[in-house]
Amino acid sequence: MPHIVYMARCISTGKLYFGITKRSLTARWRAHVTAANRGSSYYFHRAIRKYGPDGFDLKLIETVHTLGEAISREIYFIAEHSSLAPRGYNSTSGGNCPTDISAESKRKMSIAARNRSPEQRAKLKAAWQAKLPGFRHRLGKFTAEHKLKLAQRLRTIRPPKPSQATRQKMSASHRRRLLTKQINGASLSPDQVREIRAMHKEDDSWGAISRIARQLNVSKATARNVIRGIYYVGPLYTGPQTTRDGGTAA
């Protein structure tokens, strides 16, 4: 599987970080930023928190075919550019990826993870939440006093409810838009809608929608939407009433 060797350079300090991944560079950088936001103590992640994700330039150096080649190149670049901390952001000299985990070991690790006790899961959850930023995860649930303050704050920033007269105007405007809704570029009259539904009631066999659409000179999507009842038609429509033969009723 191809692997990439990449470099991150801090714009403010000029320090470098070299890494390898089998994912895309964008996905790997997103993982670095996520780990930094969760409070990772790695030297590189602390730098991301300090200077921000936009404070680094990313560069794909080369693509290799195997993990062994990628590790070899990572070790070379770290030594060549002296990017080991504190002169750079690499915490190790490279090549610290686990390469010798057998299939049997992976299977045992998977079984152990699935069979964790509730106490173990609780400890792991607490340890994970302790790394998350924000006082909610560090201090626990909100107190009653804090919830009251949040509720009061929300009430001040929410827009006021419209009056009854405004709501009636909004409802009437919405009904007018529904009654004159453009369906695929053509306004259908109530007679046309009723005709489509009546024809489908008489013939609902396979291909009936296509035949109805061709006969009434409308798109197949329009006929299907009318049959499904997506578009509402009511007494406010004032347009011409089209008949089956294409004429216009008075």
Image (spheres, rainbow, N blue to C red):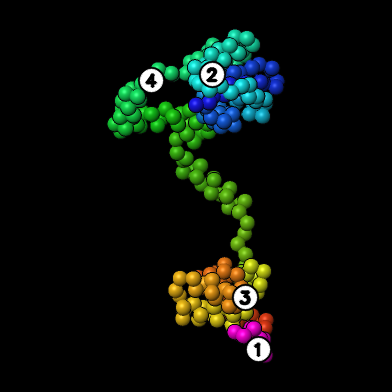
Query: What label does residue 70 carry, if any?
Result: 2
Examine the structure image and report whether residue 135 is included in the region drawn in magenta: no
Q: Nearer the viewer, mark 2 or mark 4?
A: 2
Of marks 2 and 3, which one's residue comes earlier in the chain?
Answer: 2
Q: Are marks 2 and 4 in contact (CB under 8 Å)?
A: no
Q: Which amino acid type corresponds to the residue marked 2 in the rendered image? A: Ala
Q: CA distance from mark 1 to mark 3?
A: 18 Å
Q: Which amino acid type corresponds to the residue marked 4 in the rendered image? A: Ile
Q: In the picture, residue 149 is in which quadrant?
A: top right
Of marks 1 and 3, which one's residue comes earlier in the chain?
Answer: 3
Q: Are marks 2 and 3 in contact (CB under 8 Å)?
A: no
Residue assigned mark 4: 101
Q: Are marks 1 and 4 in contact (CB under 8 Å)?
A: no
Q: Is residue 160 among what the camera can see?
A: yes
Q: Secondary structure at mark 2?
A: helix
Of marks 2 and 4, which one's residue comes earlier in the chain?
Answer: 2
Magenta stretch, residue numbers: 242-250
Q: Residue at x 61, y 51 (%)?
A: 156
Q: Residue at x 54, y 78 (%)?
A: 196
Q: Secondary structure at mark 3?
A: loop
Q: CA distance from mark 1 to mark 4?
A: 80 Å
Please state the horizontal and vertical placement of residue 1, each as a whole percent of the image.
Answer: 50, 26
Residue assigned mark 3: 217
Please state the horizontal and vertical placement of residue 129, each as a whole percent of the image.
Answer: 45, 31
Q: Residue furthest bottom?
A: 250
Q: Secondary structure at mark 1?
A: strand
Q: Which amino acid type corresponds to the residue marked 3 in the rendered image? A: Asn
